[in-house]
Image (cartoon, rainbow, N blue to C red):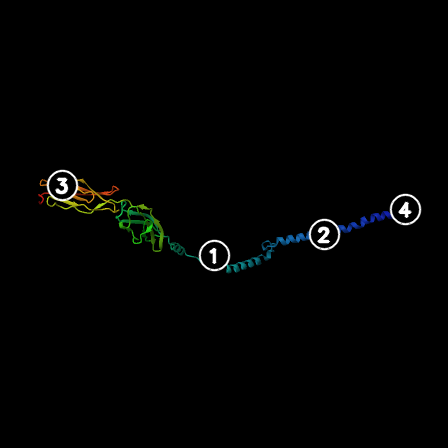
Amino acid sequence: MMAVKESKTRNSQQPVFSAAPPQRRLRLGLLLIATGAVVVFFVLFMFRDRSLQPIPPVGSVAEILAEQKMAVLDETSLSPSVDALPTVPISSVAAAMTAVNHPPRVTSVDVQPKSFYSGIDLTASAEGSDQGNDLVGFKYRWFVNDQHVVVFDDATLTGDQFYRGDRLSLEVVAYDTEGDGRAFRTADVIVPNGPPSIVSSPPGEGNAGRYEYLVQAVDPDGDEITYSLEESPVDMSIDPGSGLLIWPIKAENVGVYSFRVVASDPEGMKSSQEYTLNLSLTPKQ
């Protein structure tokens, strides 16, 4: 009975001691394999670039430097260095810079006369500048009510091209030998009302005891003209509509007489004419 009990005791303990050693060896082998794989991966990762290669022995440094020098020479043959570029003279660069033309510009425009109306010629003068000190000329374009007056592409616009109430403007372009600059446009100016102008001259003497003078005037805007006397001898009169001036001369009317005739339009614009008449002899009867 004792033999059987000891046999059961050995059988119950044998599986525990017999299985332990193989499991430890297996786990240790797997751990070593994994560690080796990590080391190999790390080494490959660290030395993937040439610049990270291990430092060569001292004896091979000269050979490596020689190889690198040959590589640089090969690369410069395809892509020259800055030192290999051709030298451009400074005078050539300056000449290229001065060859770029800058168009001239208009700096001021003046139109004369300042007081004008229909029938009065207008003349413009312009000033300009050019960065290259080139000779500058000017082109003029006149506009009446925003319509280009093609006939007058110069500095003068004649007074018969516009009337009272018209809008005038001027466009000036500066140019040099290389081309035109930017156009300069003046502001619009409204043509004002113009006064009538007396175009006739009084006679120097009377006839048959009577002095007559038919005053004639024209209005630039076509307005109706009214005639009047501001200064005259006694008995001298003028017809407001026709402008006929009459003065009955008597025997005692010997001497120097002055008179002023006035022509006016409905807007109040007017012009006058003064004349001195010398009656030294008795008028013919």
- Dot 1: what SS? helix
Q: Amino acid at mark 4?
A: Met
Say which residue appears at 69% left-offset and 52% top-offset.
Answer: 34
Mark positioned earlier in the residue sequence (3 or 2): 2
Q: Residues within 10 Å of mark 1 (few under 14, many from 20)?
A: few
Mark 2 and mark 1: Cα distance apart in space: 61 Å
Q: Residue at x 86, y 48 (%)?
A: 8
- Is residue 26 visible from the viewing direction of this image? yes
Q: Position of residue 30 (x, y in %)?
A: 72, 52
Q: Secondary structure at mark 4?
A: helix
- Secondary structure beneath label 3: strand
Q: How many marks?
A: 4
Q: Position of residue 99 (x, y in %)?
A: 38, 55
Residues at marks 1 and 3 touching, judged by CB atoms closer than 8 Å: no
- C-alpha gap between disc 4 and disc 3: 186 Å
Picture quarter containing residue 57? Answer: bottom right
Q: Give the residue at mark 3.
A: 257
Mark 1 vs 4, N-terminal side: 4
Quarter of image, res 213? top left
Mark 4 = which residue? Answer: 2
Q: Is residue 150 above or below residue 212?
A: below
